[in-house]
Image: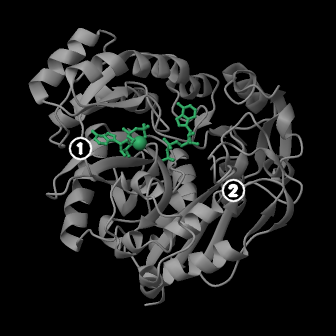
C-alpha cells in the first residue's frame, strides 16, 4: 500500500483527495504557492511545502519543484487531481523516473488521449464511433478547408491539445473558417503551447453524455454509468446530473459497453472519463477521453455508492478492483452545481476574501469545497469555489433539495454564480430534462428578465 501521498493540486480537489487518503490511512503532503499560504488544503494536510510564487508556471505547473518536494518529504506517490499537471505526460514520466507512483493511468495513455485527433483515430480503429473529421492536427488552413469541403459545414475547429472548453470555434462556411482558423490556432498556442488544430463535424444540438471508467492494472475495466453534462456555457460545464434524464437502460448499457471497449482498446489502468456527444437521432460519438478524475465525479459516487478517488488510489497501488460490472448498481438521482467566484451580471471573475461563510447541509446534500471563513480566492487560479451536490430518490427530489441548499448557502465578500443556478433550477425547459449543449447560451440571451419567473413556470416548479 502507498505510504505517503503528495497532492499536486489546490482548492476543492486537493481537499477531496486528502479526504480519500485519510479514509485509507495514508498521510498527505500539500503543495502551495505563496498566494495559497492560508488555503484550506494547506491547513488540512498532514504536511505542507511551499513550491513557489503565485504564477502557475513557477508553482503548480513546476515539475522539478513538485517532484523534489515529494522526494524530500518521503512521499512514495503523487496525486495530480484535475487541471494543472494532471494530463501532462512529462509530469507522470518525471514522477515514475524518480520512483514515485503517479496516481493515474500509464504515461502512454495520457499522451495518446492528450493528442485529441490521434485519440479519434485510435478510437475509430477500435470500432468506437467518432464524428467525421481529421485524424491529425494541422496549422495549415488549406488542409482544414479541404476536410471541411469533404464533410460539409458546419464544422468545429478544435485545439489538438485542448481542454477546459478552450480553443473551439464553429465555422459555417469556407469564409468563416478562414476568418476563425487563426483565432483558434492562437488560442491553442496560448493555452496549451500547441497551435495544432483539427476539424470535426459540428453537431447543432447534441447532448454531452460521458461515462465514468474505473480500471485496474489487471485488465479489469468497468463503467459507473453516465453523467449528463449538457448545461454548459462557452463549452464549459456548469451543472451536471446522473443519470441522464433521457437515457434508457438499454442505451446506458450500449453506450457503457462502448466506453469500456474504448478504455480496453488502449489498456487503460485508472479512473477516467469517456466523453460522447449524443445527437437528436440517438447516435453517439466519442469526442475525447479525460485521463484523470473529473470535476463532476461526485454525482456518480452518489448514485453508485463508490468512492472514485479511493478507487483511483487503490488501482495505482496495484490493487485489483473489488467489483465486476454486474456488481455496479444505480440508485436515485444526483445533481452537481459548480459554484464559481464570478459576477452573475458580467460573468467576470470575482476574486476576494470570503466572509460570513455558511455552507448548506441536510438530507442528501454534499458540499465539496476548498474554502472556509476568511479564505482568499486569488486572481491567479480557476474560479471554482466549491461543488454542491444534491441527491434524491428522483430527479425532482434532487432538484428540490438543491434549490433549498443553494438558497441557504451564504458566501459574502465575493460574488458567485448561485443566482444563475437558482434560475436554471426553476426553468421550465430544464425541468422537463429537454436540454442540449446550447441550452444555457439560449437561456442567457432570452429577452425576458429571468428572476421574474412567469406564472406558468411557477406552476411547473410547484408541480
Ligand atoms: P471537467 O469535465 O473535469 O470539468 P475540464 O476540461 O472542464 O474537465 O477541466 C477541468 C479543470 O481543469 C478545469 O478547472 C479547467 O479549467 C482545468 N483545465 C483543463 N485543461 C487544462 C489545461 N490544459 N491546463 C490547465 N488547466 C486545465
Ligand atoms: P474540452 O477538452 O475542452 O473539454 P471537448 O472535445 O470535450 O473539449 O468539447 C467540449 C464541448 O464542446 C463539448 O461538451 C460540446 O459542448 C462541444 N463540442 C465538442 N465537439 C463538438 C462537436 N463536434 N459538435 C458540437 N459540439 C461539440
Ligand atoms: Mg471535454
In the figure, residue 390 lies in which quadrant?
bottom right
Secondary structure beneath dot 1 equals loop
Q: Which residue is drawn at 43% across and 56% down?
A: 440
Q: Please tell me which residue lies in front, 81 or 384.
A: 384
Can residue 431 be seen here? yes
Q: In this rendering, is residue 132 above or below 321?
A: above
User: Which of the 4 image quadrants contains residue 71?
Assistant: top right
Counting from the top left corner in percent of width and height, residue 188 is at 46, 22
Residue 33 in percent (x, y) is at 81, 32
Ligand 3, image quadrant it occupies: top left
Query: Taking the image as drawn, is residue 307 in sight?
Result: no
Q: Which secondary structure, mark 2?
A: loop
* Quadrant containing the C terminus in the rendered view: bottom left
Closer to the chain start, of discs 2 and 1, is 1
Mark seen at residue 203: 1
Residue at x 60% of width, y 22% of height? 94
Residue 130 x/y as whole percent: 20, 39
Mark 2–mark 1 CB contact (< 8 Å): no
Callout 1 crowding tier (Cα within 10 Å): few <14, some 14–19, many ≥20: some
The residue identified by callout 2 is: 416
Q: Does the residue labelled 1 lie within 8 Å of ligand 2?
A: yes
Q: Which residue is at 19% across, 43% downward?
A: 128
Amino acid at each position: 500500500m502507498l505510504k505517503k501521498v503528495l497532492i499536486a493540486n489546490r482548492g476543492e480537489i486537493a481537499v477531496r483527495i486528502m479526504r480519500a487518503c485519510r479514509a485509507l490511512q495514508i498521510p498527505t503532503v500539500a503543495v502551495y504557492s505563496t498566494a495559497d499560504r492560508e488555503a484550506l488544503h494547506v491547513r488540512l494536510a498532514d504536511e505542507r511545502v511551499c513550491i513557489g510564487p503565485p504564477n502557475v508556471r513557477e508553482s503548480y505547473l513546476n515539475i522539478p519543484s513538485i517532484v523534489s518536494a515529494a522526494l524530500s518529504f518521503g512521499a512514495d506517490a503523487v496525486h495530480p487531481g484535475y487541471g494543472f499537471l494532471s494530463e501532462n505526460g512529462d509530469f507522470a514520466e518525471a514522477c515514475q523516473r524518480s520512483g514515485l507512483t503517479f496516481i493515474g493511468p500509464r504515461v502512454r495513455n495520457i499522451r495518446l488521449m492528450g493528442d485529441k485527433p490521434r485519440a479519434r483515430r485510435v478510437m475509430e480503429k477500435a470500432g468506437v464511433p467518432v464524428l467525421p473529421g481529421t485524424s491529425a492536427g494541422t496549422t495549415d488552413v488549406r488542409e482544414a478547408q479541404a476536410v471541411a469541403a469533404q464533410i460539409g459545414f458546419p464544422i468545429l475547429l478544435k485545439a489538438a491539445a485542448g481542454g477546459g472548453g478552450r480553443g473551439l470555434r464553429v465555422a459555417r462556411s469556407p469564409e468563416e473558417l478562414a476568418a476563425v482558423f487563426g483565432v483558434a490556432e492562437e488560442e491553442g498556442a496560448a493555452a496549451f503551447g500547441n497551435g495544432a488544430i483539427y476539424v470535426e463535424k459540428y453537431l447543432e444540438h447534441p447532448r454531452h453524455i460521458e461515462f465514468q471508467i474505473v480500471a485496474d492494472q489487471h485488465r479489469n475495466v468497468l463503467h459507473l454509468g453516465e453523467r449528463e453534462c449538457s448545461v454548459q456555457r462557452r463549452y464549459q460545464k456548469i451543472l451536471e446530473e446522473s443519470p441522464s434524464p433521457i437515457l434508457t437502460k438499454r442505451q446506458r448499457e450500449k453506450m457503457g459497453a462502448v466506453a469500456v471497449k474504448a478504455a480496453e482498446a488502449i489498456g487503460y489502468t485508472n479512473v477516467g472519463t469517456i466523453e460522447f456527444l449524443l445527437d437528436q437521432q440517438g447516435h453517439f460519438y466519442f469526442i475525447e477521453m479525460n485521463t484523470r478524475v473529473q470535476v463532476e465525479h461526485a454525482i456518480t459516487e452518489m448514485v453508485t455508492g463508490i468512492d472514485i478517488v479511493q478507487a483511483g488510489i487503490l488501482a495505482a497501488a496495484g490493487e485489483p478492483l473489488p467489483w465486476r460490472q454486474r456488481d455496479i448498481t444505480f440508485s436515485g438521482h444526483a445533481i452537481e452545481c459548480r459554484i464559481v467566484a464570478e459576477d452573475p451580471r458580467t460573468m467576470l471573475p470575482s476574486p476576494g476574501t470570503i466572509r460570513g461563510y455558511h455552507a448548506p447541509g441536510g438530507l442528501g446534500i454534499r458540499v465539496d469545497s476548498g474554502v472556509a471563513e476568511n479564505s482568499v480566492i486569488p486572481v491567479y487560479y480557476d474560479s471554482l469555489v466549491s461543488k454542491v451536490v444534491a441527491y434524491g430518490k428522483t430527479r425532482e427530489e434532487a432538484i428540490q433539495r438543491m434549490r433549498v441548499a443553494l438558497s441557504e448557502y451564504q458566501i459574502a465578500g465575493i460574488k458567485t454564480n448561485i443566482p444563475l443556478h437558482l434560475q436554471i433550477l426553476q426553468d421550465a425547459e430544464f425541468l422537463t430534462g429537454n436540454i442540449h449543449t446550447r441550452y444555457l447560451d439560449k437561456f442567457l440571451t432570452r429577452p425576458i428578465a429571468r428572476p421574474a419567473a412567469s406564472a406558468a413556470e411557477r406552476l411547473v416548479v410547484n408541480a
